[in-house]
């Protein structure tokens, strides 16, 4: 899953640890999400959306590519 978490965090000058604290997860979880190695749970995605005052879809995007014929 693609996401804008790193960009949104950087825009606010937050460290991974600060974002992790705000979302009540570990810094390692934030690192894994930012690198696309871990997809957040739905409750965590909602929490991040509320924190950044954005829709979930504005932060997280499915990576399914459509094939055009």
Image (cartoon, rainbow, N blue to C red):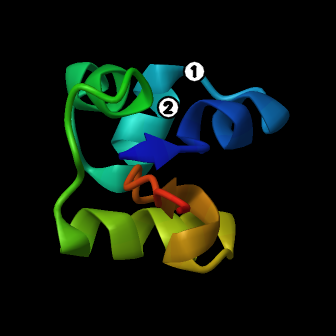
Looking at this view, name the residue that lies furthest to the right.
Answer: 11
Q: Position of residue 50 (x, y in %)?
A: 53, 76
Closest to the observer, 28 or 36:
36
Q: CA distance from mark 1 to mark 2?
A: 5 Å
Residue at image point 40% right, 59% down? 62
Q: Position of residue 18 (x, y in %)?
A: 50, 31
- For label 2, count other residues whose C-alpha is less than 10 Å away and answer few (under 14), some (14-19) or many (20+): some
Determine whether the residue tagged by mark 1 lies in a helix, strand or loop. Answer: loop
Residue 15 disc label: 1
Residue at image point 23% right, 53% down? 40
- For label 1, count other residues whose C-alpha is less than 10 Å away and answer few (under 14), some (14-19) or many (20+): some
Closest to the observer, 56 or 62:
62
- Check disc 2 and report the residue beneath it: 18
Residue 44, by quadrant, is bottom left
Q: Position of residue 47 (x, y in %)?
A: 39, 70
Q: Position of residue 68 (x, y in %)?
A: 55, 61
- In this picture, residue 49 sits left or right of residue 46: right
Residue at image point 23% right, 30% down? 29
Asked if 49 appears above or below 6 in the picture, the reply is: below
Closest to the observer, 62 or 17:
62
Determine whether the residue tagged by mark 2 lies in a helix, strand or loop. Answer: helix
Residue at image point 22% right, 72% down? 42
- In this picture, residue 51 sits left or right of residue 30: right
Asked if 69 appears above or below 18 in the picture, the reply is: below
The answer to whether marks 1 and 2 mark residues whose Cβ atoms lie closer than 8 Å is: yes
Asked if 23 appears above or below 18 in the picture, the reply is: below
């Amino acid at each position: 899953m693609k996401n804008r978490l790193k960009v949104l965090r950087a825009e606010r000058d937050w460290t991974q640890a600060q974002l992790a604290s705000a979302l009540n997860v570990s810094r390692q979880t934030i690192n894994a999400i930012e690198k696309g190695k871990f997809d957040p749970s739905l409750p965590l995605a909602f929490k991040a959306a509320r924190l950044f005052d954005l829709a979930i879809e504005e932060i997280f995007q499915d990576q399914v590519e459509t094939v055009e014929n």
